[in-house]
Image: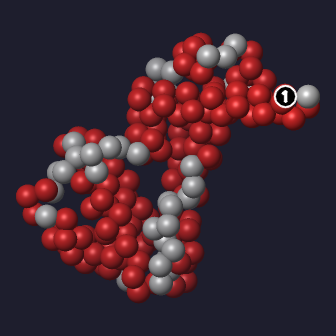
Amino acid sequence: MAEIRRRDREGTRCRILDAARRLFAELGYDRVTMRLISAEAGVNIALINRYFGTKRELFAEVLAVRGRFPGVLDVPRGQLPRRLAEYVADLLGSREEGPVLATLSRSAVCPEIHGLVSDRVRAAILEPLAARLPGEDALGATAATALVAGAGTLRRLFGPGAFDEEGREAVVARLTKVFEACLG
């Protein structure tokens, strides 16, 4: 009986997180309400409060569930500029916006969660990147992070395939040079 309850509890928690993830990505933090999340998840609003507390805490959990800059930094140091360039080119060419990027871009201006968003970017990209650089080069890591974050903004403004006419490999080659300059 306890195992059934635990699975139900975990299933409910997952439904809430999935609903919150979809809604935050689609609408942004400001436009999402706890009632909207509860309706999307098919649960009582009290369960959201019990499992996650406030909307801000639920938003933090949505961000935390996603892995850190998945696999991008897991290459030898010499391959890092090209790997970052490939990541950005793939982001610009992607037909679908990833849920974390969508959530961050639609929610970044909200003062209530500004700290959460900046902490997420710092923990997921900036600090791991700086740790990979000689002397933990904060300036180089900041410049590279700006390029990655800016790519998300560019994609949102111009839609997918902003550089289709030049081809992916040409974009990767140019961006590799830019990342090499950033990362020293």
Is 26 placed left or right of 137 in the picture? left
Is 44 placed left or right of 107 in the picture? right
Residue 182, position as x, y percentages in the image: 35, 74
Residue positioned most to the right? 1
Can the viewer see residue 151?
A: no
- For badge 1, the amino acid type reads Arg
Is 155 placed left or right of 61 in the picture? left
The residue that disc 1 covers is 5
Q: Is residue 183 above or below residue 43?
A: below
Residue 21, position as x, y percentages in the image: 53, 34
Can the viewer see residue 1?
A: yes
Q: Residue at x 51, y 85 (%)?
A: 134
Q: Quadrant of the C terminus?
A: bottom left
Residue 62, position as x, y percentages in the image: 59, 39
Q: Residue at x 45, y 68 (%)?
A: 72
Mark 1 falls on what kind of element? helix
